[in-house]
Amino acid sequence: MREGAKREDRDRRHERRRIQPGGYKPQRVTAALRVVAGNRGINNGEEMGAVVQLVSPIDNKVESVFVHVTDLRRSAEWYSMIMGLPLLEERLNGGNVYWLNLRGGTGLILDDNRSNSPDTPHVRFMYKTDDIEAAFRYAEEKGIPTIGGIDRPHEGLAFFRFVDPDGNAIMVTQSDYVSDVVEKPEDAESPIQNRIGGIFLNVTDMNRAIRFHSEALGVAYKEVADREEDSIYDLPMRQGSSVLLDVNRAKHGDAYQTLFMFVAKDVDGAKAYLASKGVPVFTDIERHGDIAFFTVKDPDGNVIMICIEVNE
């Protein structure tokens, strides 16, 4: 009887996974997702060896997240609506990006696909550095694959790009530019905050990804056991959004990835607000104790998570 009950429970779990849109398979919420929702950056996972601490001129702080879009105005209007922010017309002046500095220290950059070479992988986000030359030398010394050399598009800005073993492209930037946070108006209707809680990176080999990204940033790391609760690893950030290495999609054969999460104090209110704006749910609300989240797609099909804010 006990084995039969286990089989029935397993079959029910498989059926719940099968009926989710886009082949989405819900997973048990890990400690990483819990602390990100509460805006705390720590590692999760079982230690399998000594903690390794390195030194890198690449700062473990995400300056901005990139979203690659096909219609810059449409996307600027959509993301502004999501967070209840004003549309900044002066930033829709014929350029190839629309940018927003958000609360928490990590901004959002909408990047027009027409300005990007089809042979260059799309950058997911940017780290900052105070010394672009030293950061580039460090990447080369570590054998980190870079895309070209250092670009200097104008005075006060320099950057280079590298790719991880799973093909995720990341930028390292030195910039003199400072912009004020775009704040929500007091009468904003949206319950979704102007803050990116965490950024997801799809990976296929968790410990390989942990070693690569930790060594690029020069942060302490612990390898993890191959357990369901270790399917997301939270890289330690100095401030700003967390970076979450996510092996769930690879384990379950999903073709999509969630780019990042916005946070909201009321996940049900956030879902109702988006429904009133004609934004359909991609995956419905999942609740795991005091954690709740759902996902939507932007006009270009990018998957974005809305997660309840938790203060622990």
Image (spheres, grey):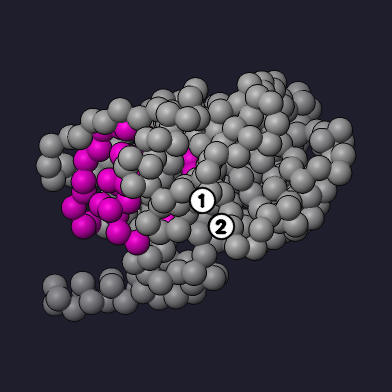
Viewed as shown, does residue 32 lie left or right of 65? left
Magenta stretch contains residue 309: no
For the record, the magenta segment spans: 198-227
Residue picked out by circle 1: 147
Q: Position of residue 78 (x, y in %)?
A: 75, 48
Residue picked out by circle 2: 121
Q: Is residue 30 visible?
A: no
Please report contact status of discs 1 and 2: CB closer than 8 Å, yes or no: yes
Question: In the rendered image, which quarter contains the N terminus?
Answer: bottom left
Magenta stretch contains residue 219: yes
Q: Position of residue 33 (x, y in %)?
A: 40, 43
- Which quarter of the picture shows residue 300? bottom right
What is the secondary structure assignment of the residue under circle 1?
strand
Question: In the rendered image, which quarter contains the C terminus?
Answer: top left
Viewed as shown, does residue 84 lie left or right of 18? right
- Which quarter of the picture shows residue 204? bottom left
Viewed as shown, does residue 246 lie left or right of 206? right
Q: Which mark is residue 304?
A: none
